[in-house]
Amino acid sequence: MTKEDVDLVEQRRSSRVEHKVIKKKKKKKRCKRKVRIQVKRPVKMISRTLQKLFDLCQQVFKGPGTVPSPSDVQRLCHILDVMKPEDVGLNRDLQFFQPRSVVVEGKQRVAYSTIYKCHNFSLCIFFLPATAVIPLHNHPGMTVFSKLLLGTMHIKSYDWADTHGSDNYDSLSILKLARMKINRSFRAPCETSVLYPTSGGNIHEFTAVTPCAVLDVLGPPYSKHDGRDCSYYRENSYGILSNRDEFTKTEDDGHRYGWFEEIEMPQESEMDGIPYMGPQIDESIS
Ligand SMILES: [Fe+2]
């Protein structure tokens, strides 16, 4: 997201605040008591949908080591499925989401904005310029809901193949076998994607086909302290073990598999944090 976009959102927010201040000044002449009550209450932009999402997150995410029940997952998806960019202060007219007239060379940096974070869950928006990539990474012990708000994004995701058998590792145990779950493009508006600690595509990669904004609900959030640090992976050619020059291979069970190697955090995964400027969550309501 460019500085101009951030300024635009801030400008809109400020103009609403100014508008309310003017209204308050006018009311001051009529009734001093009312003004005092209004001044005590902070002026906030509220999105009912975002507030509903927050309230439900507080109910369903019980903390590390837990996974929301299927019915709770469904309830969260129902809210996320109808979420609009405006619910988090975005719209497609922002400069960031316009097609680039000039081709930008080099790696595109991803930005993120945290709406809310606590011990049990977090709400975060990721902004990917066209061609930007969030490389293959995992979500240890986490349930993650991803809602694409704007743009077109290619998602590739995997789960570890059955870890009970030794067939999942190569002879040096550097590579680990992963089963492909998703490999397709999503265009907003679209349904919410959900991944779980051991299923649903816990290891994924996002590639922006056009400039994108995606809202992630993570329960619980990453925490180095609690053993939920993010790991990154490189997809190795399947040919390493089968003498065939391909990254994934369809096995007899009909699934595609790939060999993954854990790597240091890639440079392109570094992100810029930007302040959240959209509608606020009211923690006192729930
Ligand atoms: Fe992710």
Image (cartoon, rainbow, N blue to C red):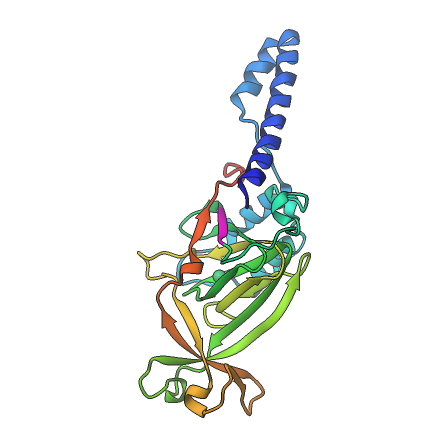
Residue 107 position in % (x across, y down): 49, 58
Residue 177 position in % (x across, y down): 43, 81
Is residue 278 among the parts visible in the rendering?
Answer: no
Compared to residue 257, the image places residue 1 above or below, namely above
Residue located farthest toward the top when viewing the structure as drawn: 29
Q: Main secondary structure of the magenta part?
A: strand
Q: Residue at x 51, y 61 (%)?
A: 133
Q: Residue at x 56, y 59 (%)?
A: 146
Compared to residue 55, the image places residue 171 above or below, namely below
Q: Residue at x 46, y 57 (%)?
A: 219
* Magenta stretch encompasses residue 196: no
Q: Report the front residue among 31 and 270.
A: 270
Residue 253 position in % (x across, y down): 56, 89
The magenta stretch is 109-113
Q: Residue at x 48, y 43 (%)?
A: 274
| 248 with respect to 226 (left or right) | right
Is residue 36 among the parts visible in the rendering?
Answer: yes
Q: Report the front residue among 62 and 42.
A: 42
The number of callouts visible is 0
Residue 13 position in % (x across, y down): 59, 31
Compared to residue 10, the image places residue 186 above or below, namely below
| 95 with respect to 280 (left or right) | right
Q: Report the front residue among 279 and 151.
A: 151
| 26 with respect to 62 (left or right) | right
Q: Report the front residue among 197 and 128.
A: 128
